[in-house]
Amino acid sequence: MKWTNEFDFLKGPRARWKELIFSMEVLFQYIKGFRNLHFIGPCITIFGSARFDSAHSYYQTTEKLAGELSQLGFAIMTGGGPGIMEAANKGAMQAGGVSLGCNIELPFEQHANPYLDKFVTIRYFSVRKELLRKYSSGFVVMPGGLGTLDEFFEVITLIQTGKINHFPVVVMGLEYHEKLMAYFESLIKEETVSPGDFDYILFTDDIQMAINHIQTKSEKRVKPRENPNRPLWILGEKKIFKKKV
């Protein structure tokens, strides 16, 4: 049903019945995400370009970082595709951790990488981004393009406005993000943001510093529930257990 897709929705007002059906589809996408991601436990989402291959230093850094985070008990989530996403999922899987993909439907096909324990495809960007924030204990932003920046800026806006808290963000790649860091400094200088708005953001090339930042800042974000829900077989739910190395 082409008239229900995001492209048509963003054209402007449509017939009421089309808007109603679109709203129902959005609700279904949320439910789909809830059912697939509810039991993943503490999770770190890693963003970055799909265009770096396994020989690139950014790929290798991502793989190592994801592996070390997995060993600390974090599930690793990505967009499920190639490049940095593949590196993160590969690092998690090889470390014996939980490796997840939360993909987005696009006009061009994106194949899932082979290092995923669980994979869910979401139709709408707005739903996908909310799910990633809801189930993540923090983000790692590797070098990437517009999609990576979109996720990054939306998260730090929510931190600034108090919509989320105790949410660590690590930006890896000092040389790649040099101009972005200078831009942030200019915002502080012009007093359009407060210095404290960036307290939860760390720019670094050091994997251990990144891990320490995530551990320190995320401690208060995700607290274990005293009576966690059990999976319901009637809803097709199941827990994802960490594999043995």
Image (cartoon, rainbow, N blue to C red):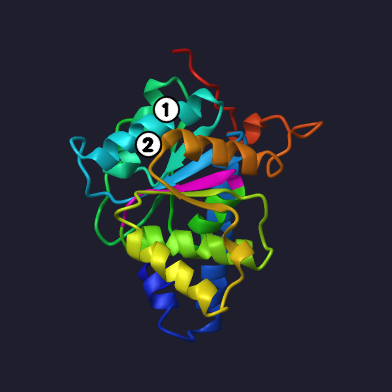
- Of residues 209 and 129, the one nearer the viewer is 209
Q: Position of residue 76 (x, y in %)?
A: 47, 36
Measure how far apart labels 1 and 2 are at the Cα level.
8 Å
Three-letter amino acid code at disc 2?
A: Ala
| Residue 186 vertical placement versus 143 (above, below) | below
Return the disc, 1 or 2, that comes first in the chain's sequence.
1
- Of residues 34 and 162, the one nearer the viewer is 162
Q: Position of residue 52 (x, y in %)?
A: 22, 45
Three-letter amino acid code at disc 1?
A: Gly
| Residue 19 vertical placement versus 122 (above, below) | below
Residue occupying image coordinates x 56% and y 40%: 214
**Which residue position is annotated with label 2?**
88
Q: Is residue 184 visible?
A: yes
Residue 138 is inside the magenta segment: yes
**Quarter of the image where one finds residue 24:** bottom right
Q: Which residues are magenta?
A: 135-144
**Which residue position is annotated with label 1?**
67
**Quarter of the image where one finds residue 239:** top right
Q: Residue furthest right?
A: 226
**Quarter of the image where one finds residue 125:** bottom left
Q: The residue tagged with tag 2: helix, strand or loop?
A: helix
Q: Is residue 98 visible?
A: no
Residue occupying image coordinates x 43% and y 78%: 10
Residue occupying image coordinates x 49% and y 38%: 209
Q: Position of residue 26 (x, y in %)?
A: 54, 62
Residue occupying image coordinates x 41% and y 62%: 181
Residue 128 is inside the magenta segment: no
Q: Residues within 10 Å of mark 1 (few under 14, many from 20)?
A: many
